[in-house]
Image: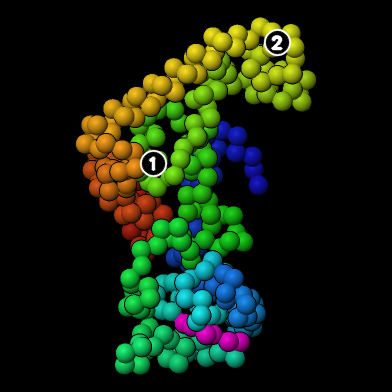
């Protein structure tokens, strides 16, 4: 993988991965998500996943249907579990012997395999779609909201879903506005490494370690005693303290403007976004959904947030 040593390189790489992810989503007729969480693995889901991939290749269907391992899908007692992502159909207790039926009935003929669907506890009727299953529709996933989107064995899935965005902000963002936005999007805390380093005198010369034969020119990050003696610790300590003090002061000011008393009151519903066409959006979920171009026809316009 290429080195992402500047914010610009990161943005370019993230854009490439997002476009690749979007193209992949549209290219396949169905994305078959096989749970490989702990409970389902104990029930044999790895073997089910491997057999499904093998059978699709044997039938020359590998370029039409993607098999994707995911983290826990939820109902561990019903494993191995499979979710057909695009059609939103959930299968439970799937065994290797069921693979042929899934391929022939569901994938080729478009008919769900009823015996593998979830059945209502009240009347015993089959419930094909996830959104209609009580176990799921009573939940609002927070920690597991990306489950099924990210293959834990593929780093690009994580990146396409916004992975490392927080790291980039920690290394590059400095302002109280950035803190408000990141905390509103669900961060538990925020580290602003670059801001504190620069207030301590860092000039970003990129000679911190000294391994290239050159040392930090300001004496902040160096083992060279002569350079360290020239670094005024107390003076720069005051700079760091002032940066931190004013950062918090201005965060409190923004909270007051928003009518909030505590940073814990922030959430994504408190944010408004303005796109490049000066249109205001108050639904952050819709903004990110369109940013990744999920669930849209490939021919539609989808560039307003890019």
Badge 1: how crowded within 10 Å, few (<14), some, or many (20+)? some
Nearest the viewer among 21 and 162 is 162
Residue located beneath label 1 in the image: 183
Percent x, y for residue 145? 43, 60
Please tell me which residue is depicted at 48% across the width and 42% down the height of the picture: 166
In the image, is 33 to the left or to the right of 295? right
Query: Who's the residue at 45% across and 40% down the image?
Result: 189
Which quadrant of the view contains residue 45? Answer: bottom right
Q: CA distance from mark 1 to mark 2?
A: 38 Å
**Residue toward you, 155 or 103:** 155
SS label for mark 2: helix
Quadrant of image for the C terminus? top left
Q: Residue furthest front?
A: 261
User: Can you say whether 179 is above or below 237 in the image?
Assistant: below
Mark before the other along the chain sequence, 1 or 2:
1
Would you identify the image quadrant in which residue 293 lies? bottom left
Most frequent secondary structure within the magenta stretch: loop
Decide whether residue 125 is among the magenta residues.
no
Q: Write down the region rendered in magenta.
A: 91-96
Residue at 51% from the left image edge and 72% from the top image edge:
33
Q: Nearer the viewer, residue 245 or 175?
A: 245
Q: How is the image coloured?
A: rainbow
User: Which residue carries the number 2 mark?
Assistant: 227
Q: Position of residue 14 (x, y in %)?
A: 51, 46
Q: Is residue 222 left or right of residue 250?
A: right
Taking the image as drawn, is residue 83 in sight?
Answer: yes
Which x, y percent locates residue 249? 34, 24
């Amino acid at each position: 993988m290429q080195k992402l040593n500047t914010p610009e390189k990161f943005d370019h790489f993230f854009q490439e991965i997002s476009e690749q992810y979007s193209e992949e989503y549209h290219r396949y007729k169905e994305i078959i998500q096989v749970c490989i969480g702990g409970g389902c693995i104990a029930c044999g889901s790895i073997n089910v996943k491997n057999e499904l991939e093998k059978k699709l290749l044997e039938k020359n269907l590998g370029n039409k249907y993607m098999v994707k391992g995911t983290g826990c899908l939820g109902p561990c007692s019903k494993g191995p579990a499979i979710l057909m992502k695009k059609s939103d159909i959930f299968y439970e207790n799937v065994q290797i012997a069921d693979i042929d039926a899934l391929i022939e009935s569901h994938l080729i003929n478009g008919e769900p395999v009823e015996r593998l669907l979830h059945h209502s506890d009240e009347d015993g009727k089959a419930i094909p779609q996830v959104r209609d299953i009580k176990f799921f529709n009573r939940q609002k996933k927070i920690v597991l909201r990306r489950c099924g989107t990210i293959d834990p064995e593929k780093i690009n899935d994580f990146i396409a879903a916004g992975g490392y965005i927080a790291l980039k902000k920690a290394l590059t963002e400095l302002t109280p506005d950035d803190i408000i936005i990141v905390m509103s999007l669900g961060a538990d805390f925020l580290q602003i490494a670059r801001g504190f380093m620069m207030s301590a005198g860092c000039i970003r010369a990129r000679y911190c370690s000294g391994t290239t034969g050159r040392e930090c020119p300001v004496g902040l990050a160096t083992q060279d005693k002569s350079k360290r003696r020239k670094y005024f610790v107390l003076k720069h300590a005051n700079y760091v303290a002032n940066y931190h003090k004013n950062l918090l002061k201005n965060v409190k000011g923004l909270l007051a403007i928003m009518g909030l008393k505590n940073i814990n009151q922030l959430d994504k519903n408190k944010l408004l976004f303005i796109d490049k066409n000066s249109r205001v959006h108050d639904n952050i979920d819709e903004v990110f959904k369109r940013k990744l171009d999920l669930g849209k026809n490939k021919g539609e316009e989808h560039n307003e947030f890019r």
